[in-house]
Image: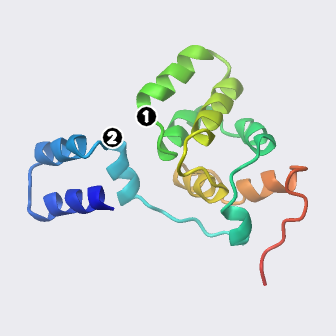
Amino acid sequence: MVKFASLRTCSDNNKLCGDFIKAMETAGLNKHTMCMILRQEISSTDLPDNILNLPPSDEMLDKLALRIGKKWMELGLELGLDIEQLEYIEYDSPNVLRDISKSMLYQWKEREIGNTIRDLQNAFTRIGKKGNLIRETLENCESFPNIKPDH
């Protein structure tokens, strides 16, 4: 929050774009972070919070990897991975989208922060994937057998 407040102050004081980028670098933020903050689109879902706040299972990530397609890099950026990480993943698994998508999702999951089903739901929405993709995937996972919305 301190980093974001500093960037917001820079913006409010009519600093130039170069000043803004310099402030982001000083704060240790990648350039894509501000895009994510400004685009913080929250998707609507009837999945209960107790499900959305869980980390995704390996089974779920395996199934999602089959449905990402050519938007794997865009999704990785939305999930907060650096472009360098994504380029390495692409280099490591060339020509097989499923493997690239799977590697990207597992690298995201291994981070210490921001690896919940809610984060996946929001990222998929921001790249234009249909909102019920997460629910459909969960319903087909043995690791999440009883998904029912809270009433």
| Residue type marked 1 | Asp
- Mark sitting earlier along the chain (2/1): 2
| Residue type marked 2 | Asn
Residue at mark 1 = 82
Secondary structure at badge 2 equals: loop
User: What distance separates the C-alpha of mark 2 from that of mark 1?
Assistant: 7 Å
Q: Residue furthest front?
A: 112
Tell me if 98 is positioned left or right of 113 in this view: right
Residue at mark 2 = 30
Residue at x 57% of width, y 37% of height: 71
Residue at x 63% of width, y 26% of height: 100
x, y percent for residue 56: 71, 49
Quadrant of the image containing the N terminus: bottom left
Tell me if 74 is positioned left or right of 14 in this view: right
Of residue 89 and residue 55, the one placed in the foreground of this image is 55
Quadrant of the image containing the C terminus: bottom right
User: Where is residue 45, by image quadrant?
Assistant: bottom right
Q: Give the vertical position of 10 relative to 23 (above or below).
A: below
Tell me if 9 is positioned left or right of 2 in this view: left
